[in-house]
Image (tube, rainbow, N blue to C red):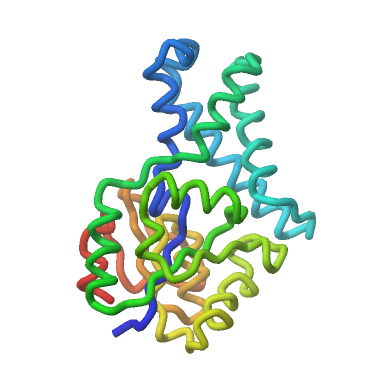
Amino acid sequence: MAQICVFDAYGTLFDVAAAARKLAETPSGAAIAETWPALAEDWRRKQLEYSWLRAVTGDYVPFWQVTKDGLDWALAKAGQDDPELREALLALYWELAPYREVPEMLARLKAAGKACAILSNGSPDMLEGAVDSAGIGTYLDAVLSVEAVGIFKPARAVYDMVGARFGCAPEAVLFVSSNGWDAAGAAAYGFQTVWVNRRGEPVDNLPGRPQHVLADLTTIPELA
């Protein structure tokens, strides 16, 4: 059984499509009312691609910059050049909704005596905003940002942060991510790993393979 449960943040605990979806439901978001799913998908894809490329080249910048760069690309692809639309989307990214099962799942883990943490590409201020908005701070023992090591996941230096913080061996950690590449990287590192495969995609063909594949986070306490 794992002693420590570590979660990726964006796409795992927090719904990265929530910003575009929420704005599209308001008069201010009329321009993306019909196209917000594609915009959200492009934004997330470019955000991740830019983090990987920067990890390879060593050109680290805080994740907030990567997030803005990804949005600018997505807006350009959508033919949107409204600065107010851009600013509204960025503001909403600081208060992304958690997936519905997150609070109860974390509460169950804490009731069982498990340490819980976030390990994320996100900048510390971004993560603080998301955690506060979701109201889940009371369940977390640590919020770890890659900013401390200056490189994005899946670099091993990022996963090293868990052992440095908790003084534990990799096999004592249950690592949970909705990103297949992150779950693979964590598995190769030596963590017990869960891939939250919300979209029913194939397992990535990478050296590490997750021990568990779930549709959502509901049954994580049974695995910890």
- The residue lying toward the viewer, choosing from 130 and 61, is 130
In the image, residue 109 sits, relative to residue 37, either above or below, namely: below
- 67 left or right of 22? right
User: Which residue does the image show at 33% across and 82% down from the upper left?
Assistant: 2
Residue 127 placement (x, y as % from top left): 53, 52
Residue 155 placement (x, y as % from top left): 63, 68
- 92 left or right of 102? right
In the image, residue 175 sits, relative to residue 28, either above or below, namely: below
User: Which residue does the image show at 44% across and 19% down from the upper left?
Assistant: 35
Q: Quadrant of the C terminus?
A: bottom left
- The residue lying toward the viewer, choosing from 69 and 98, is 98
**Residue 81 position by quadrant:** top right
User: Which residue does the image show at 37% across and 19% down from the upper left?
Assistant: 25
Residue 93 placement (x, y as % from top left): 51, 37
In the image, residue 104 sits, relative to residue 2, either above or below, namely: above
Count the numbered circles shown. Answer: 0
User: Which residue does the image show at 72% across and 63% down from the upper left?
Assistant: 150
Q: Quadrant of the N terminus?
A: bottom left
